[in-house]
Image (cartoon, helix red, strand yellow):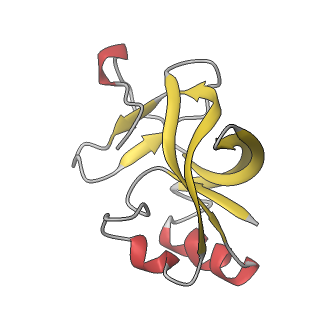
Amino acid sequence: MIIFVYGSLKRGKKLNYYLKRAKFLGEAITCDKYPMILSKSKWYPYLIERKNQGYYIKGEAYKVSSCLLKLLDRVEEAPHYYYRKKICIKIDGKKYKAWTYFVRKVPKYKKKELLSNF
């Protein structure tokens, strides 16, 4: 299975150690545009499932086991805080289906707050 990460699970970020046993597949970008904003704390982003709004989101792709995916669900507090869904991503121009996490409760935001990368 492939997971697309765009926030605190990326290399160099505070939760990346959860992916130490996963295979890094490369830098990735979403096939579709999505809104992404920072949390109030500014420590992590929220990806919002509103296709064709916002930007193409830059992140990373990893190959993970089903056991690791279940652990990541707990880390991301899915399905209560975030929920997991498959989206289309591109790695070096090639398309893949990958799991990612969307925020469940969408906060109010302004267009100027939208990000393409965290």
Task: Give percent across and percent down for residue 31.
Answer: 67, 31
Q: Looking at the figure, which quarter contains the N terminus? A: bottom right
Which residue is rendered at x = 67% and y = 41% of the image? 90
Looking at the picture, does residue 107 appear above or below residue 44?
above
What quarter of the picture does the C terminus occupy? top left
Outermost residue, top direction?
A: 111
Figure label count: 0
Q: In which quarter of the image is residue 93?
A: top right
Q: Which of 117 and 53 is in front in this view?
A: 117
Dividing the picture into quarters, in which one does residue 110 lie?
Answer: top left
Q: Residue furthest front?
A: 92
> Residue placed farthest to the left in the image?
41
Name the residue located 48 percent from the left edge and 35 percent from the top edge. 106
Query: Which of the 4 image quarters holds residue 34?
Result: top right
Q: Relative to 11, does residue 52 appear above or below in the rendering?
A: above
In the depicted structure, whether residue 74 falls above or below residue 2: below
Instruction: Tell me where residue 64 appears, x and y as whole percent.
Output: 67, 73
Q: Which of 114 and 103 is in front in this view?
A: 114
Q: Is residue 41 left or right of residue 102?
A: left
Q: For the point 78% across and 48% down, which residue is it?
A: 97
Residue pictured at 51% horizontal, 35% vertical: 57
**16 or 36, nearer to the observer:** 16
Image spot of residue 9 (x, y percent): 43, 64
